[in-house]
Amino acid sequence: MAQRNPVTIEKKGRAVAVMISESEYAAYQQLKVQALQSDLNAGIRQADEGQLLDSETAFNDLI
């Protein structure tokens, strides 16, 4: 029987994984691609507008 809802897999009472249908996974992957494209476009816009950071500042912001 097909499962429509996500299935949580637990180990020692803690969720360690979630199984979803192939169609839900494909939709999730598409959302990730759209989010990445949006972030890249925003970065390109900022660069075009001269809103750039030097590498030291950029890397310090990641820490």
Image (cartoon, rainbow, N blue to C red):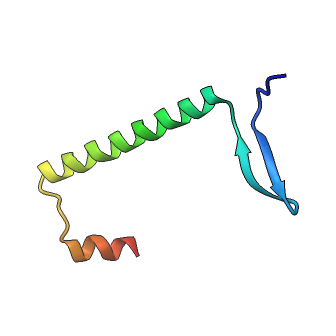
Residue 40 placement, left or right of 25 = left
50 or 41: nearer the viewer? 41
Residue 11 placement, left or right of 26 = right
Q: As displayed, is residue 2 above or below residue 17?
A: above
Q: Residue at x 20, y 67 (%)?
A: 53
**Furthest-front residue in view?**
1
Q: Count all numbered tags in the image, as a single digit.
A: 0
Q: Residue at x 82, y 54 (%)?
A: 10
Quadrant hosting residue 12: bottom right
28 or 53: nearer the viewer? 28
Q: As displayed, is residue 45 above or below residue 24?
A: below
Q: Residue at x 76, y 26 (%)?
A: 4
Residue 13 placement, left or right of 52 = right
Q: Position of residue 39 (x, y in %)?
A: 34, 46
Q: As displayed, is residue 58 above or below residue 4?
A: below
Q: Position of residue 28 (x, y in %)?
A: 55, 36
Quadrant hosting residue 3: top right
47 or 16: nearer the viewer? 16
Q: Quadrant of the C terminus?
A: bottom left
Q: Position of residue 29 (x, y in %)?
A: 50, 37
Q: As displayed, is residue 5 above or below residue 40?
A: above
**Furthest-right residue in view?**
13
Q: Residue at x 38, y 71 (%)?
A: 62
Quadrant hosting residue 5: top right
Q: Position of residue 1 (x, y in %)?
A: 85, 22
